[in-house]
Image (cartoon, rainbow, N blue to C red):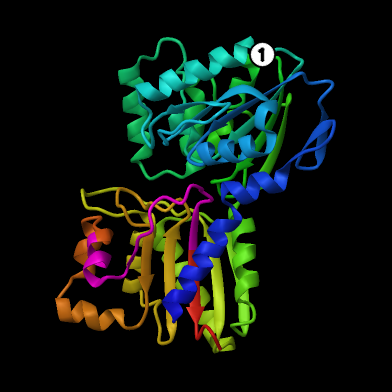
């Protein structure tokens, strides 16, 4: 029952920040204008409308945009991991999480289109997680091989996304708001945040974070978790969003979650706790896993899982690290299974092989790509359904 409730909470969170919900809520076609978030853009002033999208959710966001604006769209470009076509917007399949030659080609295609637009054109730019890797134009003098070495080293270092994007901006001709300088058109940037604290200068390495652009965050970890909290409030005695800015390495995050569970155990015999953010981890071996499954493994080892308590650590994009899983469950019954199969949790942790560990126990949570990305969720449920 508890696992089922945690799955429901996960999907409730995800559905609130999927393309369909976000675009329909924030783009409205009126008689003589387009309402974007809380501002109207007059169609008499802007003769042509172009839609550009970059990121893991870009294809689906662009597709929803087409459904609303239809033939009002004069063109554009969607850069994503999807190899699918759209009616009014050109599509291009790029790569992630490592910048590739496809990323260079994608950036050049986007810039070429940007440079043809004028001040009477309106650009709706849809930005989501993964954009930093999907498009890139390095600074002059930096060839692909050198750029690849720098990007790969920083990505594997375990630094948080702010530090990662800081490096990306310094060696790029488009990041840090520079992309917006390639066009005279009026630009509106709608952002699905995959960054702790929703810093617009960090999301997608701040591609469109420029004073000439109207920037809006339309989807975030907080929006997702608020919906989940509301859905569970009648089934537990206490529902609490503990944080949406969890930004620690997996060991410190596990300790923080354990201490929070202990605190709530003293006060309530039934509760749902929500943690959102993005932990960090350093890859030291060649196993299969990701930060969510590693966090779950560390919660297991530090004894955070108590009787009548179930935990889910999961990535909102549906894929955790280099595995095909989304995350992992924990409950008190897992210890018996570990003993029965004679598994050494510490050994799996040292080998960065958390996915293999949870799969053997059938405690992995695997659903595939969700089409959105607002960082990670940790749900803790005690006596759910009371």
**Side (left or right) of 48 relative to 99:** right
The residue that appears at 81% across and 25% down in the rendered structure is 43
Q: Does 31 sit above or below residue 280?
A: above
262 or 9: nearer the viewer: 9
- Vertical relation: 84 (above or below) 316: above
Determine the residue positioned at 38% across, 23% down: 102
At a point 31% along the width and 72% down the height, the residue shown is 301
Note whether residue 209 is visible. Answer: no
The quarter of the picture where the N terminus appears is: bottom left
Give the total of numbered labels: 1
Percent x, y of residue 65: 63, 37
**In the drawing, does residue 100 fall left or right of residue 358?**
right
Local packing at callout 1 (Cα closer than 10 Å; few below 14, some 14-19, many 20+) is some
Residue 186, position in %: x, y? Answer: 73, 22
Question: Does 117 appear above or below 44?
Answer: above
| Residue 98 rendering spot, x and y as whole percentages | 36, 33
Q: Quadrant of the C terminus?
A: bottom right
**Above-or-below relation of 141 to 57:** above
Residue 23 location, quadrant: top right
Among all residues in the image, which is located at the extreme left?
A: 342
Locate residue 44 relative to residue 138 in the image: left or right.
right
Range covered by the magenta-colored residues = 356-377
The part of the image, by quadrant, that contains residue 201 is top right
Is residue 63 covered in magenta?
no
> Which residue does the numbered mark 1 point to in the structure image?
117
Residue 172, percent across and down? 49, 21
Q: Is residue 216 visible?
A: yes
In the image shown, does 155 or 53 lie closer to the viewer? 53
Q: Give yes or no for residue 376 being in the magenta stretch.
A: yes
Where disc 1 sits, the SS reads loop
């Amino acid at each position: 029952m508890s696992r089922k409730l945690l799955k429901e909470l996960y999907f409730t969170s995800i559905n609130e920040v999927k393309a369909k919900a976000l675009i329909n809520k924030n783009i409205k076609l009126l008689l003589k204008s387009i309402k974007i978030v809380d501002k109207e853009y007059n169609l008499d002033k802007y003769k042509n409308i172009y839609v550009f999208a970059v990121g893991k959710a870009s294809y689906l966001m662009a597709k929803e945009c087409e459904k609303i604006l239809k033939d009002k769209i004069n063109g554009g470009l969607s850069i994503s991991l999807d190899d699918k076509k759209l009616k009014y917007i050109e599509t291009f399949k790029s790569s992630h999480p490592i910048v590739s030659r496809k990323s260079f080609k994608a950036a050049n295609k986007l810039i070429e289109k940007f440079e043809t637009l004028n001040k009477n054109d309106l650009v709706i730019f849809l930005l989501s997680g993964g954009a930093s890797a999907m498009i890139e134009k390095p600074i002059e003098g930096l060839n692909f091989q050198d750029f690849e070495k720098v990007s790969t080293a920083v990505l594997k270092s375990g630094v948080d996304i702010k530090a990662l994007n800081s490096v990306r901006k310094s060696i790029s001709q488009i990041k840090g708001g520079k992309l917006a300088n390639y066009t005279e058109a009026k630009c509106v940037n709608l952002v699905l945040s995959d960054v702790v604290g929703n810093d617009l200068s960090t999301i997608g390495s701040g591609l469109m974070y420029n004073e000439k652009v109207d920037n809006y965050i339309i989807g975030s970890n907080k929006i997702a978790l608020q919906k989940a909290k509301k859905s569970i409030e009648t089934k537990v005695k206490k529902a609490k969003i503990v944080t949406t800015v969890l930004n620690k390495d997996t060991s410190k995050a596990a300790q923080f979650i354990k201490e929070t569970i202990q605190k709530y155990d003293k006060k309530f015999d039934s509760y749902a706790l929500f943690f959102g953010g993005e932990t960090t981890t350093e890859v030291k071996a060649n196993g299969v896993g990701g930060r969510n499954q590693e966090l779950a493994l560390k919660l297991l080892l530090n004894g955070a899982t108590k009787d009548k308590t179930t935990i889910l650590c999961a990535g909102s994009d549906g894929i955790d690290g280099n595995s095909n899983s989304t995350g992992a469950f924990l409950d008190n019954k897992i210890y018996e299974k570990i003993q029965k199969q004679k598994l050494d949790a510490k050994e799996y942790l040292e080998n960065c092989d958390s996915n293999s560990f949870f799969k053997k126990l059938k405690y992995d949570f695997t659903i595939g790509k969700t089409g959105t990305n607002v960082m990670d969720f940790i749900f803790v449920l005690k006596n759910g359904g009371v």
